[in-house]
C-alpha cells in the first residue's frame, strides 16, 4: 500500500442504441447496446485506512430518497472487497466518492464509481492487475461496469458486460436532462416483459442490432446518428412514468436533432447539432420547469483513469 492518496475518475454513459432480447434463463436479458461515454465524471479517492470505510460527497450525498449508501451495499465497497480477494491483499482503505453524475438517472453513475474504485485501488494497493483481470472483476460486479473501464464508444453484448470498442469519427454534443425521481431498472425491464407478454410490444427472437448507430458514429453524420437512435426500454419507462413524454417533447421543441431516454431513464438525452446548439438547448431546458438537472456534455471520452 502506498502512503499517498490515489484518485481515479470514470464517465457517465448514454446508450445510443439499446436492443433488448427475451428474458434469459439466468434472469437477465440478452442485449445489443452501443455505449457512449460522455464528459460527466465521478471521482473515487483511496487513502490509508484500517479496514474499509466510505464517504460520499456531491450528487446523492446525505440522507433521504436517492441517497448513495456509504456501506458495503455500495458497488465501490464491493469492488474493493473483490479486488482485495483477487489480489490477496488486505482490504484496507478509506474511500471517498465525489459525485457529479446524477443518481438513478440511467447514466451508470454507480458503475462509473465501481470502475474508478478498481483503477484507484489497483494503483493504491499496487496489485498490478492486468486490463483483462479488471474487466473480469468488473463483469462480476455489474453489467455496465466493464464499459465504464473502457469508455469511448463500445458495442455491448451478452447482458452488456461483453464490450468491443467502436470507432467514432468525431465528438458529438448532448444535453442531458434528468426529469423527476429515478426509475428502478428492474422495474422497467419487468414492464417491458409485461408489455411484450400482453402483445403491446413485439416480442423479438433476439435484440435489435446497433449497426445503424455504429455506421453513423463512424461516418460522423449527426443527422444519421439522430435517425438511428433507439432504446427498447423507452416504451416501458414511459408506461411507468407518462410524464416523461413532456420531457421528451421539451427537448424536441428546444431544437434537438433527436431525443431518447438513456437506458432505463429518467434522463432525456438530446443530441445537438454542435456545441453552440447544445449550450442553447441546455439553457432553454433549464428554464422549462421539467428537469431537476440539465447538463451539456460531449462524447466520447476515455473510461476510468487515474487523475492527479
Image (spheres, helix red, strand yellow):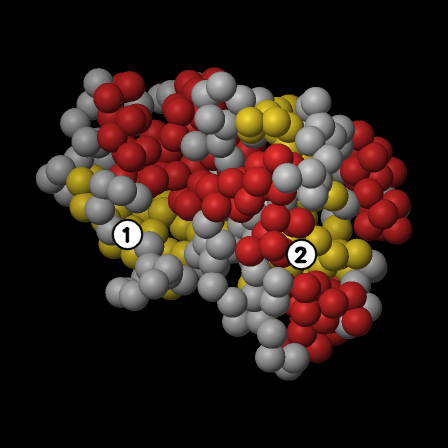
Which circle marks residue 113 in the picture? none
- Local secondary structure at mark 1: loop
| Quarter of the image with the N terminus in it | top left
289 vs 303, nearest the viewer: 289
What residue do we see at 49% from left, 19% from top?
A: 25
Q: Quick check: can you spot residue 107?
A: no
- Name the residue that disc number 1 marks: 69
For marks 2 and 1, the one nearer the N-term is 1
What residue do we see at 36% from left, 47% from top?
A: 44
Q: For residue 220, which quarter of the picture?
A: top right
* Residue found at the very far front of the displayed protein: 198
In the image, residue 303 sits, relative to residue 129, either above or below, namely below
Which percent across, then down, holds residue 50?
Answer: 11, 39
What residue do we see at 39% from left, 30% from top?
A: 141
- Local secondary structure at mark 2: strand
- Name the residue that disc number 2 marks: 269
Which percent across, then down, holds residue 62?
Answer: 28, 65
Amino acid at each position: 500500500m502506498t502512503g499517498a492518496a490515489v484518485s481515479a475518475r470514470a464517465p457517465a454513459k448514454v446508450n445510443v442504441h439499446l436492443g433488448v432480447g427475451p428474458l434469459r434463463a439466468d434472469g437477465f436479458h440478452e442485449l445489443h447496446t452501443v455505449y457512449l461515454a460522455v464528459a460527466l465524471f465521478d471521482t473515487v479517492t483511496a487513502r490509508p485506512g484500517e479496514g474499509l470505510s466510505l464517504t460520499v460527497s456531491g450528487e446523492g450525498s446525505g440522507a433521504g430518497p436517492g441517497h448513495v449508501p456509504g456501506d458495503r451495499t455500495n458497488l465501490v465497497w464491493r469492488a474493493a472487497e473483490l479486488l482485495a480477494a483477487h489480489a490477496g491483499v488486505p482490504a484496507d482503505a478509506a474511500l471517498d466518492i465525489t459525485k457529479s453524475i446524477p443518481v438513478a438517472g440511467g447514466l451508470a453513475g454507480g458503475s462509473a464509481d465501481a470502475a474508478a474504485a478498481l483503477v484507484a485501488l489497483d494503483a493504491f494497493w499496487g496489485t498490478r492487475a492486468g486490463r483483462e483481470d479488471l474487466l473480469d472483476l468488473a463483469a462480476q460486479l455489474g453489467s455496465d461496469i466493464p464499459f465504464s473501464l473502457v469508455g469511448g464508444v463500445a458495442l455491448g453484448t451478452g447482458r452488456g458486460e461483453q464490450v468491443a470498442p467502436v470507432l467514432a469519427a468525431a465528438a458529438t454534443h448532448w444535453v442531458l436532462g434528468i426529469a423527476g425521481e429515478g426509475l428502478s431498472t428492474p422495474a422497467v425491464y419487468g414492464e417491458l416483459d409485461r408489455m411484450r407478454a400482453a402483445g403491446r410490444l413485439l416480442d423479438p427472437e433476439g435484440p435489435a442490432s446497433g449497426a445503424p448507430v455504429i455506421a453513423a458514429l463512424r461516418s460522423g453524420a449527426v443527422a444519421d446518428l439522430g435517425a438511428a437512435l433507439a432504446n427498447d426500454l423507452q416504451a416501458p419507462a414511459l408506461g411507468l412514468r407518462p410524464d416523461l413524454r413532456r420531457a421528451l417533447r421539451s427537448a424536441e421543441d428546444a431544437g434537438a436533432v433527436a431525443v431518447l431516454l438513456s437506458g432505463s431513464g429518467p434522463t432525456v438525452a438530446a443530441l445537438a447539432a454542435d456545441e453552440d446548439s447544445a449550450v442553447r438547448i441546455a439553457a432553454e431546458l433549464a428554464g422549462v420547469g421539467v428537469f431537476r438537472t440539465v447538463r451539456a456534455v460531449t462524447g466520447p471520452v476515455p473510461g476510468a483513469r487515474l487523475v492527479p
